[in-house]
Amino acid sequence: MSLEAARIVAGVMQKKHNAVLGLATGSTPVGMYRILADMNKSGEIDFSDVTTVNLDEYYPISPENDQSYRYFMNTNLFDHINIDKARTFVPDGSAKDPDEACRDYEKALKKVGKVGIQVLGIGQNGHIGFNEPAKNLEVLTHVTKLTKSTIKANARFFESEDDVPTKALTMGMGTILRSRKIIIMANGEAKKDAVAAMLKGTINTSCPASLLNLHKDVTLICDKAALGE
Ligand code: GLP
């Protein structure tokens, strides 16, 4: 999975200078980041002219906190490649005014231009980024409250469930769907129901990932356990 995803991302970078990569956190893409860093070391791909935009960040959280998505991106990718960190964007989890931070993020996204490829994971409840299942989904980057199930699922990275931030800043569904190309990665049985809901052939905001059916260039990369029947 990691190799296949890395190949697709590298292909986008090799095809176009100044590529804009949309990146995701979570355990799923970690192997892909390792391979991309190796490909960078061996000279296969060059990040010197690349811009990255991340999907989401907890709120409130400081960028130095080792559970922040900024910290995750630095340690899993940016510290190991020849990227200019000034060209790496993650929503500001330490902003005083989170709504303003979201508006600023949309402005920054407009400035960097169209995302060439957006990498996504999927939550056990079908969320992408932190767009949680709900009656209404937001179009643009916004502040969101995490569901109990997401807090529980992400507690494994924190000392206790109480330490998981209850809010996040996330790209909206429209922000995500704007990208030219999307890959979504899922592995393990825990993702089976979410993947099934996404592939069912209907679109429902109770499975935000099902909205990806509206996009014309999405690749699902998953293992047998996540694909189920
Ligand atoms: C997190 C992130 C998502 C990620 C998902 C799955 O909460 N906000 O971007 O895709 O949950 O994480 P994991 O890959 O660890 O299963």
Image (cartoon, grey):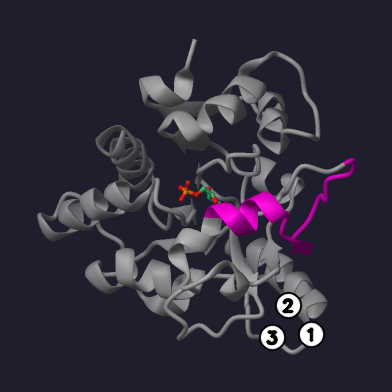
Residue name at image x 25 percent, y 66 percent: 81
Q: Are marks 1 and 3 in contact (CB under 8 Å)?
A: yes
Q: Which residue is mark 2?
A: 101
> Which mark is first along the chain, 3 or 2?
3
Q: Are marks 1 and 2 in contact (CB under 8 Å)?
A: yes
For residue 6, what is the image quadrant?
Answer: top left
Query: Which residues, given as a range, are shown in magenta?
Result: 135-153
- 112 relative position to 51: left or right: right
Give how far across and how far down residue 137 sits, in percent: 83, 45
Separation of residues labelled 1 and 3 (CA atoms): 5 Å
Magenta region includes residue 146:
yes
**Number of other residues with Cα within 10 Å of mark 2, as a class: few under 14, some 14 to 19, many 20 or more:** many
Which residue type carries mark 2? Ala
Label 3: state its secondary structure.
loop
Residue furthest top in the image: 229
Give how far across and how far down residue 7 sits, in percent: 28, 37
Label 1: state its secondary structure.
loop
Q: Is residue 76 shown above or below 183?
A: below
Q: Which residue is mark 1?
A: 97
Q: Which residue is mark 3?
A: 95
